[in-house]
Each structure stands twice: as C-alpha cells, then as structure tokens.
Image (tube, rainbow, N blue to C red):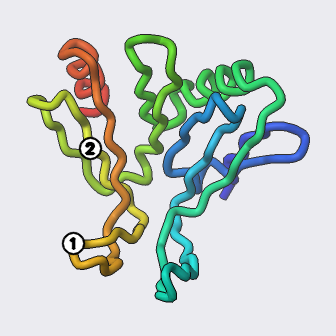
C-alpha cells in the first residue's frame, strides 16, 4: 500500500492518509494538521488530576505562510483527494479542510446555514458536573449565505 505523503518543506513530510482536518493560523504563520487518532494528556488543575483526550496534531511553522497555504489548498483540490475545502465567502480567511474519509457522519442544518462533521476519532469534553467524558470530534462549518451553503451541501451529497 502506497503512503500519501505531502512534502510540506525540507523538514516535514505529512502522511495525508492520517490527516482528519487542516486549519490555518495566519497570525503565527502556522498550518495545523489534525490527525485521525487521539492522544491522552495528563492534566493537573487545582490539585485535581485527570486525563484529557485530544486529536493528535502536527504544526507546520511556515517561512512563507501565504505561499505554503495556497500550495497546500491547490494540492488538496485535485480530484484524487477526498477533502472538503470550505472556502470562506469573504476570501480573507483561510478555509477549513476536512478529510471526508475520516468522517463518521454529516449533519446539514439549513436553518443555521451550518454543516456539522462528526469525525471518527475521540476527544474529551467537560460535562455540566465538571467531569471529562469522551465523544466524537465535531467540526462545524458555518456559511454566510444560502448560496454558499447550498453549493457546499451539493458537493457533499
């Protein structure tokens, strides 16, 4: 089986087969690859010890954020990939990128112009009693108008 590595730069190759989503932090010139498995962190807070479950991730601290982000988005737009790329309508922010092979379910909320992706990996959350429990990771994509929402929905059906 061939691995699907993306060469981010001289020091980082990322196996896209294990990437569940990608986000962009322009302020810090960073691209974040969220992975399709979870890790547990030991947390000590107010003398209370607990384990918190998060998606593992890789930071790519870029030298040229705009070029790096644009190249990655262009690369993942190729038809052989199954990535949903939610481009914001204002063209000022960077998109949310979701690997559709890592999605358990998709919920369409037309009233809120929102698509909710339930990812296959687990994370923890704090319930109303301050106890940590496991759930699937959720990614919310909100849309500014019904046209962009409808286009996104049709691309997913």
Q: Residue at x 73, y 43 (%)?
A: 60
* Residue 10 quadrant: top right
* Residue 121 quadrant: bottom left
Residue under circle 2? 116
Say which element carries label 1.
loop
Horizontal arrangement in the rendering, residue 37 relative to residue 7 (left or right): left
Tell me where residue 69 appears, x and y as whole percent.
66, 26
Contact, CB < 8 Å: mark 1 with mark 2? no
Q: Residue at x 66, y 58 (%)?
A: 1
**Foreground residue, 73 or 82?**
73
**Foreground residue, 79 or 98?**
98
**Foreground residue, 62 or 45?**
45
Tell me where residue 14 appears, x and y as whole percent.
71, 49
User: Alpha-carbon distance for marks 1 and 2?
Assistant: 22 Å
Q: Please tell me how many numbered marks the rendered image carries.
A: 2
Quadrant for the C terminus, please: top left
Horizontal arrangement in the rendering, residue 16 relative to residue 110 (left or right): right
Horizontal arrangement in the rendering, residue 36 relative to residue 104 (left or right): right
Q: Residue at x 27, y 18 (%)?
A: 144
Q: Residue at x 48, y 12 (%)?
A: 91
Q: Earlier in the sequence, mark 1 or mark 2?
A: 2
Tell me where residue 72 appears, x and y as whole percent.
65, 29
Q: Residues within 10 Å of mark 2 (few under 14, many from 20)?
A: some
Horizontal arrangement in the rendering, residue 9 relative to residue 120 (left or right): right
Q: Residues within 10 Å of mark 1 (few under 14, many from 20)?
A: few
Residue under circle 1? 128
Say which element carries label 2.
strand
Placement of 100 over or under 18, stated as above or below: above
């Amino acid at each position: 089986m061939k691995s699907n590595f993306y060469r981010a730069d001289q020091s980082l190759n990322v196996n896209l087969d294990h990437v569940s989503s990608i986000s962009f932090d322009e302020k810090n010139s960073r691209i974040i690859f969220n992975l399709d498995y979870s890790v547990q962190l030991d947390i000590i807070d107010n003398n209370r010890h607990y384990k918190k479950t998060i998606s593992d991730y890789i930071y790519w601290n870029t030298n040229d954020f705009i070029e790096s982000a644009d190249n990655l988005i262009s690369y993942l737009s190729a038809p052989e990939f199954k990535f949903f790329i939610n481009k914001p309508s204002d063209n000022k922010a960077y998109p949310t990128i979701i690997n559709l092979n890592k999605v358990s379910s998709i919920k369409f909320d037309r009233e809120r112009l929102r698509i909710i992706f339930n990812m296959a990996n687990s994370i923890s959350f704090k319930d109303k009693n301050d106890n940590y429990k496991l759930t699937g990771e959720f990614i919310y994509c909100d849309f500014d108008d019904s046209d962009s929402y409808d286009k996104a929905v049709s691309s997913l059906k």
